[in-house]
Image (spheres, helix red, strand yellow):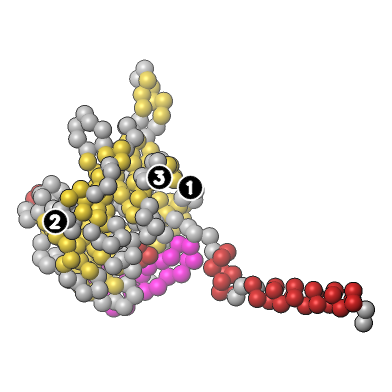
Amino acid sequence: MVPGLRWVVASTTVAVLMITQVRPTPAAADAATTKKVFARYVVDSSPVGTHPDEDPIGPWRLRLRGGRLIRLTDAMFTDPLSWPILTPHGSQVAYYRKSDGALVVRDLSTGKVRAVPGRFSREGGLCKLSPGGRFLVVCGQPYQVVNTITGQTHTLPSGYYGKLSFSPDNKYVLFHRATDPNLVSRDPGITEVFSTETWTVVYRGTQVGALRMGGSIVAYVDAQFSRPTYIRFWNLATGASAGSAIKVPVGETPRALVWDQAGHLDVLTYLENKYRGGLVIRKSGYRWRRANSGMRILDAFRIQATHWRPADGGLA
């Protein structure tokens, strides 16, 4: 064989080996092609213009980012009413399944539905689904935190709980317990951060907010009349402020704060109608902003519904 021919054969062999080494497995290929799907909010099927005092109408639906509306045809309309609940970023949703009454978690990207082991009373509403759908908080007396993978349930100390927040990695959860049930929203009460592994209290304080990785730092909204609104940070371990405040754009009211594992802080704001000469020149709407990245807008949308619940319905 001539030298030139030997070179061509060797080169071809190496190329084939390289292609074989980087060929993805079927599972990796499926993961790579799965497009992440997020929901903006849960909504019922009431016609536009329905009075707020009227009861919601089934089936439950989800408004996705991008505007598409999908129906949760297998979600039960419970009595008493229990809304489906989304994770903070809207990637998964939990609800009671119509066919068997089971508590389930649906991944919106894959469409897969998994049942939570065990049976749960539908007397309490579903008030929080942690990142990735790992933990579900059932509101009632008492409050219960359900591990959706194992079905294990942790019962919280008796009391009236206002805001709560999971760290992005689900290792910690913050609860704000009020001392007066009639003043849950403004009672200073006590803030406690639990380890979700041992269910022991690791931090205590009075400041409530969105819990960051590590479980000690919370982000909260500082809004005072006739003054700019800021997002501030508090260290529950030291009892002192942490980091620099972030100014919220004028005219926007923060409705939710959400951390991710990479340290990004997102804020959902509400923008009211803007008028000129008695006419609406800009309609109201909502914006998700990356707070610690120059308040960059991630998503913007309007609500055309009477009964709805956002992906993260409270400031924590």
Is residue 294 visible in this depiction of the protein? yes
Q: Is residue 161 above or below residue 196?
A: above
* Image quadrant in which you'd find residue 152: bottom left
Magenta-drawn segment: 102-122
Three-letter code, disc 3: Ser
In the rendered view, does 97 fall on the left or right side of 38?
left
Residue lying farthest to the front in this orientation: 3
Residue lying farthest to the top in this orientation: 277
Three-letter code, disc 1: Gly
Query: Which residue is painted at 41% across and 25% down in the image?
Result: 281
Report how far apart the C-alphas of labels 3 and 2 lie in the structure: 28 Å
The residue indicated by pointer 2 is: 205
Q: Is residue 38 magenta?
A: no
Question: Residue 268: x, y in percent?
Answer: 34, 45
The residue indicated by pointer 1 is: 67
The residue indicated by pointer 3 is: 293
Query: Which residue is painted at 25% across and 74% down in the image?
Result: 197
Label 1 vs label 2, nearer the camera: 2
Query: Which residue is painted at 65% across and 73% down in the image?
Result: 23
